[in-house]
Image (cartoon, rainbow, N blue to C red):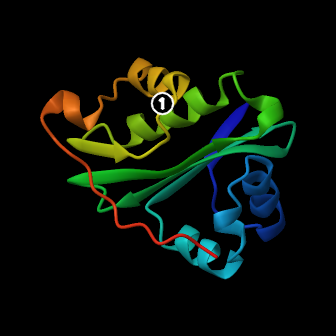
Amino acid sequence: MDIREYTDYNDEEIRSLYDSVGWTAYTCDMPALEKGYRNSLLILAAYDNGRLVGIARAVGDGSTIVFIQDILVAPDKQRQGAGTALLKEMLTRYAHVRQIELATDSRPETKAFYKSLGFSEFSEIGCSGFMRYTPTT
């Protein structure tokens, strides 16, 4: 597994990866997703034998806050360390930032994954999170 910065946006491989995990809300508007990539702070990619198998994407100011916008791994490569490696590298790159956030589903295994890497639920640190969400059609 090779973790490196993702600098050359490839529409086909990004669409394939997002679709493989069911994140079609992103791929229904590929121009918006590409613009999001181009405006990101950092995108890290996991490659296995030259194939893109995972992505972690950060947005924010890079000094006071970083938001992990996306972290996804191809289904056939999940539970093999790619997600952990991507997130650990992201945390290393932004070790100087006090506030690193992400939003995710509330499945127990997902919560356990992020807690194992030092994240806390907002309620555990006396905070609440809010989101204005507009579903895609």
Residue drawn at point x = 65 percent, y = 23 percent: 81
Amino acid identity at mark 1: Lys
In percent of width and height, residue 124 lies at 20, 27
Q: Quadrant of the C terminus?
A: bottom right
Residue 25, image quadrant: bottom right
Q: Residues within 10 Å of mark 1 (few under 14, many from 20)?
A: few
Does 110 sit left or right of 11 as displayed? left
Instruction: Tell me the residue that label 1 is attached to.
Output: 88
In percent of width and height, residue 38 lies at 55, 73
Residue ranking furthest to the left: 126
Q: Is residue 8 visible?
A: no
Q: Nearer the viewer, residue 62 or 55?
A: 55
Please tell me whether mark 1 sits on a helix, a strand or a loop.
helix
Residue drawn at point x = 68 percent, y = 56 percent: 23
Q: Is residue 53 above or below residue 24?
A: above
In percent of width and height, residue 32 lies at 60, 79
Residue drawn at point x = 40 percent, y = 42 percent: 93
Q: Quadrant of the N terminus?
A: top right
Q: Is residue 57 above or below residue 38?
A: above
In percent of width and height, residue 9 lies at 70, 67
* Labels in figure, total: 1
Q: Is residue 104 visible?
A: yes
